[in-house]
């Protein structure tokens, strides 16, 4: 149930499917219990199922698909039987050489059960395991083959391992509760289960947790620059998480301050689009002196609208998720802050909702630059033609969404907002820290 509560705290990272695998390190080697299903964590596991998932090590996962369709087979953790027992693997990120690796394995006779990159990683680990003395050595060897973004939590029958790609695209941190170690994508999950934060897994590091404690292998940590995903700070992560030493909340607050400095406008109230726009709105308010307010009431029982597969369901779900607080905005000049505009569906809707509720002016500010390029490293960005900023000027976008003015965060502010960490800004600038694949490698796109 510790994993269950950890997954609940990470639900914002993926709402398509989820799963838990556990093992008893004193029990028989091949015996791993697991359960996976589509949907949210609290829907997928019944108390009876959780009761059965007993063990002293385990892996959990919540999925949001980038490569590979949204199906039950693609749910994680992957559980595979191999020569040394059972391997369970949870992966966050996206490989850029998965198609080549998959082909190579397929020619070697491999049979795949899923369409996700993670299975390619699991196969490599399993294959290397035959030639390696230890499971962590097999992970290190597999890491030399795979390229791209991966934060991994891997359970072999007797140990728990965590690994992060050398660029450190996606987060992964270590926590401790009593004498038990925990790995999680975000520190908010550690808080939820009452574990204390130990440190982040280093880019390129493999950590191994056994009954004897924790070991670290930093041979693959590179001297070269890391490239943490800036979109984690902008949108993905929960504001109460700290990633690579930088508070997500603080970075959003700073983005709002920069917007107030770079795109000032006179107004009566600053509001955020919940959740990820709120901290930026507060930053804007603090910097500009314009009062902060609440204009939207969010229905907490529906997921993130972006994750809905079809455009039609996305449009209607904006209204299901958000409603305007009329008293707060009627007759007022409103600055509304959201974290990003991707297709423009959300912004278009909410600008109109504010007007319907009597707002005199609606000024939109966005706490990220215009979304222009695909992400090959684990964020789902639709095809370029669907991006509202593609082939449009800011003025043209303003007209489409119907705002009185529109301002984006400048690209030059990104590194500053992320506490000066070396970051990947590919989706905004087209500059990628690793060469993108020649052909577009992502799986099914949304319609
Ligand atoms: P759109 O309506 O397509 O412009 O999407 C913008 C909204 O989706 C914003 O309010 C963001 O909070 C959210 N969002 C942006 N990028 C992503 C992403 N890659 N995955 C999930 N949600 C996102």
Image (cartoon, grey):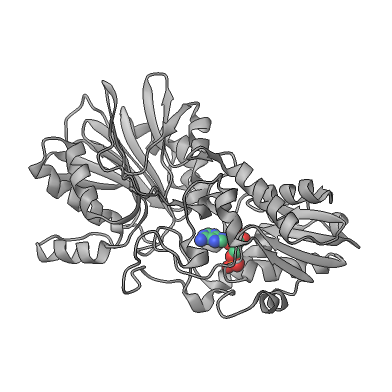
Nearest the camera: 217 or 104? 217
The residue positioned 21% from the left and 34% from the top of the image is 157
The residue positioned 42% from the left and 25% from the top of the image is 176
Would residue 127 be found to the left or right of residue 218 on screen?
left
The residue positioned 16% from the left and 32% from the top of the image is 29
Would residue 135 be found to the left or right of residue 395 on screen?
left
Q: Quadrant of the N terminus?
A: top left
Q: Is residue 335 visible?
A: yes
Residue 330 lies in what quarter of the image?
Answer: bottom right
Looking at the image, the residue that sits furthest to the right is: 331
Number of marks in picture = 0
Q: Is residue 303 visible?
A: no
Nearest the camera: 129 or 28? 129
Indicate which quadrant contains ligand 1: bottom right
**Horizontal and vertical percent for residue 382?**
48, 70
**Horizontal and vertical percent for residue 302?**
59, 54
Nearest the camera: 256 or 47? 256
Residue 113 lies in what quarter of the image?
Answer: bottom left
**Horizontal and vertical percent for residue 233?**
55, 49
Would residue 184 be found to the left or right of residue 156 on screen?
right
Looking at the image, the residue that sits furthest to the front is: 223
The residue positioned 31% from the left and 45% from the top of the image is 222
Nearest the camera: 377 or 423? 423
Residue 191 sits above or below residue 143 on the image: above
**Horizontal and vertical percent for residue 46?**
44, 41
Would residue 160 be found to the left or right of residue 415 on screen?
left
Residue 211 sits above or below residue 441 on the image: above
């Amino acid at each position: 149930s510790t994993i269950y509560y950890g997954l609940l705290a990470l639900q914002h990272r993926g709402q398509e499917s989820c799963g838990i695998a556990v093992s008893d390190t004193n029990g028989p080697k091949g015996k791993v219990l697991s359960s996976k299903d589509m949907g949210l964590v609290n829907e997928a596991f019944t108390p009876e199922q959780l009761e059965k998932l007993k063990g002293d090590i385990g892996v959990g996962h919540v999925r949001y698909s980038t490569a590979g369709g949204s199906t039950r087979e693609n749910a994680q953790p992957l559980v595979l039987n191999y020569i040394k027992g059972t391997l369970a693997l949870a992966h966050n990120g996206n490989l850029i050489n998965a198609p080549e690796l998959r082909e190579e394995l397929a020619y070697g006779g491999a049979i795949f059960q899923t369409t996700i990159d993670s299975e390619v990683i699991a196969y490599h680990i399993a294959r290397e395991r035959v030639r390696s003395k230890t499971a962590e050595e097999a992970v290190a060897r597999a890491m030399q083959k795979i390229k791209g973004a991966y934060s991994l939590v891997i359970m072999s029958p007797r140990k728990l391992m965590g690994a992060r790609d050398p660029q450190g695209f996606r987060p992964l941190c270590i926590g401790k509760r009593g004498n038990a170690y925990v790995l999680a994508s975000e520190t908010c999950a550690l808080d939820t289960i009452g574990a204390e934060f130990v440190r982040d897994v280093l880019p390129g590091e493999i950590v191994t947790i056994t009954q004897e404690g924790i070991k670290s292998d930093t041979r693959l940590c590179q001297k070269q620059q890391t490239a943490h995903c800036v979109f984690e700070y902008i949108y993905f992560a929960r504001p109460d998480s700290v990633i690579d030493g930088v508070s997500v909340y603080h970075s959003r607050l700073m983005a709002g301050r920069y917007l107030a400095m770079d795109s000032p406008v006179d107004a009566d109230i600053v509001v955020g689009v919940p959740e990820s726009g709120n901290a930026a709105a507060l930053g804007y308010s603090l910097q500009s002196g314009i009062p902060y307010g609440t204009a939207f009431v969010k229905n907490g029982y529906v997921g993130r609208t972006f994750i809905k597969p079809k455009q039609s369901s996305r449009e209607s779900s904006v209204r299901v998720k958000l409603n305007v607080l009329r008293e707060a905005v009627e007759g007022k000049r409103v600055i509304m802050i959201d974290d990003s505009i991707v297709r423009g569906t959300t912004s278009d809707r909410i600008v109109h909702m504010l007007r319907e509720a009597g707002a005199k002016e609606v000024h939109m500010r966005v706490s990220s630059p215009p979304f222009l390029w695909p992400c090959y490293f684990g964020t789902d960005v639709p095809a370029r033609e669907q991006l509202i900023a593609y082939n449009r000027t800011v003025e043209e976008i303003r007209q489409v969404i119907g705002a009185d003015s529109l301002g984006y965060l400048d690209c030059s502010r990104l590194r500053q907002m992320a506490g000066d960490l070396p970051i990947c800004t590919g989706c905004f600038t087209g500059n990628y820290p690793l060469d993108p694949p020649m052909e577009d490698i992502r799986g099914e796109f949304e319609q």
